[in-house]
Amino acid sequence: MLVAELNRGGLNAGMTEFQEKLRQQHENSMHRELEKLLSTTKGVEAENSRKDFEGFKHLFHRFLQVKGPSVDWAKINRPPEESIQPYERIHAKGLPEAIAASLNKLAVVKLNGGLGTSMGCKGPKSLISVRNENTFLDLTVQQIEHLNKTYSADVPLVLMNSFNTDEDTKKILQKYTHHRVKIHTFNQSRYPRINKESLLPVATNMGLIGENGEAWYPPGHGDIYTSFCNSGLLDKLLSEGKEYIFVSNIDNLGATVDLHILNHLMSQPADKRCEFVMEVTDKTRADVKGGTLIQYDNKLRLLEIAQVPKAHVDEFKSVTKFKIFNTNNLWISLPAIKRLHEQNTLDMEIIVNPKTLDGGLNVIQLETAVGAAIKCFDNALGVNVPRSRFLPVKTTSDLLLVMSNLYSLEAGSLTMSEKREFPTTPHVKLGSSFTKVQDFLRRFESIPDMLELDHLTVSGDVTFGKQVALKGTVIIIANHGDRIDIPAGAMLENKIVSGNLRILDH
């Protein structure tokens, strides 16, 4: 028995030693390849790429160390009551007269690294028109300009671009020169995709042209902390007296500056300053994959579906155990970011994102999420906000909602129309014929009246005439090879339309 134990002990030690050597080998090979890539460029680009690669090496090192799910399911607890405040309690405090002074300590950061490819658009997603010819970026600028004018404040807008969006975004920014908003940009890092088998970069040089363009990726929004510090912009904002940033995805049209949350942050005593607020909202069946807040090792922590052991995925998705999810609207202390960056103590779980390149090669990209750093900040807090602060436009189904009369637009902000009797958003599911924005627009002569809609499903070759009204539950399904034209002025209430309906002019 003892001999067997000893042998097994020796075997385990041998395995561990072997694994350690293998890890070291992978790391050395990676470093050699990165140096080769750097030798294909020079000057400022080489300098910036070297900075990027330092961050990548750190991530790759951690990736080689970590095996299996990064959480021990048994240690997960619900967050204590006081760590997630209901928005109503914060709102009830009211606003002081000097709220403008607080606004002057704020900068708004929009995550602007994504392309519009999933909606069939070329270029940055932020340049897609969402309402009355206004793009996501137009609406953002209008919102902040309205704040600055109303309160005689100076809230700057900061865009975190990626190498995919930077050039196109900068061209467009010229049109805002006469708006009352200072706009700054910085770039998130550019990391090499890794061959899944060899664990080496697939890039052959630092260029972005041809096949090599597929070899690079922006490493998720968790990269904001390092890139922001490296860009010099963090120090610039601190020198201008800014204390907090409000960070959100540029495609979340509900993410406007909330003065009550800002006031809550600014009114805390200096030693109890909350360094990180994550806006969460109640989960519905549509949000089962969203990250949630948990208590883990006595800290608030973001738990993403990718970290959940397979056996517990259904439990994670349940609306009963995990009742809230992360909207990715975050309020973060600038001095705290600087401190944690300098101490090198920002620790975010690695998200391993598998991809297949056009040629069929399997690669992985290592990413992190901005909200995962919540556990590193002092006095972190969740605020359970109304659903209206989470209005992302990820698909043309979302686009239909925000273009409709369900929402009214004022100073760049969308609010649910007062004419809608219940504040819930209808569930809209448009089929694959509507995926691309240009196809979607071609299929609607005008956006239907949706004030009384609960649920809409459309599948197949369907078009809508002018001034159609949809109420209750409407399901329209054109079978393969058939086409359905909903005539102008039609009113559909609790209807299922299927088969072939084509209205022909005489």
Image (spheres, rainbow, N blue to C red):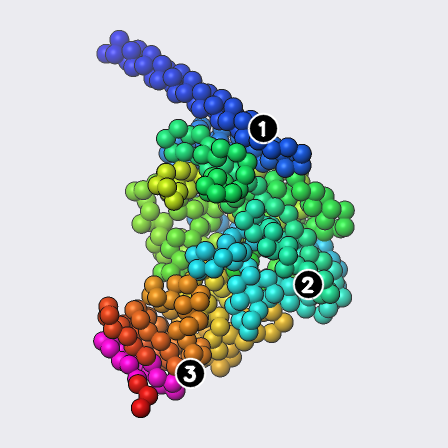
Q: What stretch is highlighted in magenta?
A: 486-503
Secondary structure beneath label 3: loop
Residue 356 pos. (x, y %): 37, 42
Identify the disc placed on residue 176. Answer: 2
- Name the front one of labels 3 and 1: 1
Residue at image point 72% right, 58% down: 182
- Residue 337 colored magenta? no
Q: Mark 1 points at which residue?
A: 39
- Of residues 297 and 319, the one nearer the viewer is 319
Q: In which quarter of the image is the C terminus?
A: bottom left
Quadrant of the rendered structure where residue 480 is?
Answer: bottom left
Q: Quadrant of the N terminus?
A: top left
- Packing grade of label 1 (10 A; few <14, some 14-19, many >=20) is few
- Packing grade of label 3 (10 A; few <14, some 14-19, many >=20) is some
Q: How far apart are marks 3 and 2 (CA)?
A: 34 Å
Residue at image point 44% right, 45% down: 303
Of the residues shown, which amino acid type is indicated by label 2? Tyr
